Amino acid sequence: MSLLKDKVALITGGSRGIGEAIVRRYVEEGAAVAFTYVSSSERAEKICEELNANGAKVKAYKSDASSYDEAEALVKSVLEDFGKVDVLINNAGITRDTLLMRMSEEQWDQVITVNLKSVFNLTKHMLRPMLKNRSGSIINMSSVVGVFGNAGQANYAASKAGIFGFTKSMAKEVGSRSIRCNAIAPGFIETDMTDELDEETKKAFLSGIPLKRLGKGTEVADACVFLGSDMSQYISGQVLSVCGALNC
């Protein structure tokens, strides 16, 4: 299939986890892909070498999405290298988990800046070229934690809930120019972090998931393919949960 043929995607945080899964699925569906990383340069280059060797057009950029100026420079570079961007996926994110009584101001600010401000930064700088082209799909990676909350993650939950409001507002602002904006809310997804959990903790997670398994990064990536493709042309301002019916 080539659901994303001739499309160019910019994906933040694309060198590992869900981000890497999205990069790979987008390439499988025919897209040219630009993605960012902050510290894992060797891993990012390895992904590019592998995918480009198979005929894809993929390029990695070292860029901190939480920096307004770096986001502006990134968008400029990607447009110079690829000519356009059809799909922006704001995937960059971190956690600094602890109970609020123990949470430092720095831990709060770090999570809000990386998880929420980065969405503003990239969307802000990507809007003008999308408005000029009168088309585009913006996909913001949130979390079910933004819907239901979670003890020890007040900063993370606040940042992900903020993405919902931002997404719905953007959908209303730019819809008249055929630009769509949606959010994805993953549940518990298999990552390097979950691989390190003990069996008892995994069982506790699974007990609350009706499908009785963790999700896969590829399943979140599939949702991104749908929202980035022409199959979702009349879908905007929505939150798509990929969570196995967790707390539905």
Image (cartoon, rainbow, N blue to C red):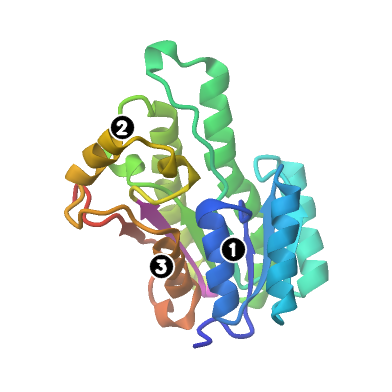
Looking at marks 1 and 2 on the same chain, the residue that comes earlier in the sequence is marked by 1
The x, y position of residue 145, in whole percent, is 34, 40
**Secondary structure character of the magenta stretch overall:** strand
Q: Is residue 171 magenta?
A: no
Residue identified by numbered label 1: 88
Q: Answer above or below: position of 12 versus 156.
A: below
Give the residue type that dot 3 points to: Ala
At horizontal 43% and vertical 79% (from top left) the residue drawn is 233
| Residue type beneath disc 2 | Asn
Q: What residue sits right under mark 3 in the picture?
A: 223
> Among all residues in the image, which is located at the extreme front?
199
The span picked out in magenta is 177-186
Q: Does the magenta segment cover residue 181?
A: yes
Task: Tell me if 182 is positioned left or right of 75 in this view.
Answer: left
**As displayed, is residue 215 above or below residue 54?**
above
Residue at image location 53% in from the left, 64% down from the top: 22
